[in-house]
Amino acid sequence: MTLAAVVFNGQSLQMFTEDERSYESPAYVHISEEGLILGEEARRLTWLEPQNSNTRHWDQLDEKPLDKPTRWARHHADLSFFQLAELLSKIDSPELLVAIPGSFDDRQLQLLLGLVEAVPAKTCGVIESALLCAEDYHRAIIQLHGHQTVISHLEHTGQYLQILNSEVVPDVGALQLLKNCARYISERSVLATRYDPMHSAIAQQTLFNELPSILKKFKTSSEAVIDIKSPDSNFSLHLNLKQIQQLLEPKFEALKVALKDYETEQLCLTPQSGLLKSL
């Protein structure tokens, strides 16, 4: 038996074991003729073959038929099962603390626990994942998912923290933010050089592969210089964080409205929400 905590998030699954091992599987599934490709390998195929890629199976865990059902998967729950089973195969006889987002309803929780049992694995407890990061002084926990942000509102009873409610801010997810950043880089590149790094599927995939390291540059500076490789030559492109923030302002406005009653120190961004910190 191996005790482990599994954190379910629309960006990735994370598993932390009692002997301090950790594993992560990005929430991407690619459906090929040979079967399902999962996690990081699937992520690197997402913009090459978007018609065969799935990224919503955790944010929208359900049993509704896929737009393109295949012999490998009928619905999101099938995709989620295979990704969960692949992650849990890394440990022996899993016994899990299941950490779920506040966006899950009773039906989704029931479905998830059924997937865990089918792996097979045991569930020893369920917790709302926002509480894993909360300190006594926090009043709102912000979790960035693949296609949405979940905000859990807290109160302190004098003895412990409890979640009052959770709200979903749709279309403010990691993928939407990355797509907007890619569009900004594309427009800047076209203006500067007439070369569009989004002009082909291969070029798009290359740009999205590099985006996380590009955005990390803004942790220490409001300006960044990146290298763009075109078929004819390589060139440097200057990026400005303020311009990206202006582009994302409509996305962030919904978050500001939901958090307007809190002081900055009362807010907590979960570890998987690092993209929001960069921007």
Image: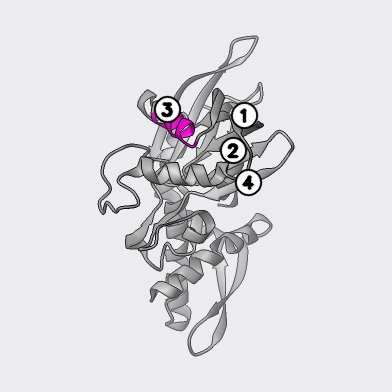
Using the numbered discs, state the Cα–Cα distance from disc 2 to disc 4 in whole angstroms: 17 Å
Q: Are marks 2 and 4 in contact (CB under 8 Å)?
A: no
Contact between marks 2 and 1 (CB within 8 A): the answer is yes
In percent of width and height, residue 247 lies at 43, 57
Secondary structure of residue under mark 1: helix
Q: Earlier in the sequence, mark 4 or mark 1?
A: 4
Side of 263 relative to 22 (left or right): left
Amino acid under disc 3: Leu
For label 1, the crowd category at 10 Å Cα-Cα, with few meaning under 14, some 14 to 19 and many 20 or more, is few
Mark 4 and mark 3: span between their CA atoms?
A: 22 Å
Q: Is residue 231 magenta?
A: no
Residue carrying label 4: 23
Residue 252 seen in this snapshot: no
Q: Which x, y percent locates residue 252?
A: 45, 45
Residue placed at 67% from the left, 43% from the top?
22
- Give the label on residue 132, or none: 1
Circles 4, 3 touching at the beta carbon (< 8 Å): no
Mark 3 element type: helix
Q: Which residue is identified by label 2?
A: 270
Vertically, is 245 above or below 259? below
Residue type indicated by callout 4: Tyr
Give the magenta part as a residue range: 111-119
In which quadrant of the rendered view does residue 30 lie? bottom left
Q: Quadrant of the N terminus?
A: top right
- Depth check, front residue: 72 or 186: 72
Where in the figure is residue 191, as x and y percent of width and height?
43, 77
The foreground one among 238 and 173 is 173
The earlier-in-sequence mark between 1 and 3 is: 3
Q: Which residue is mark 3?
A: 109
Residue under the point 59% across and 32% down? 267
Question: Which badge, 3 or 2, is on the more N-terminal residue?
Answer: 3
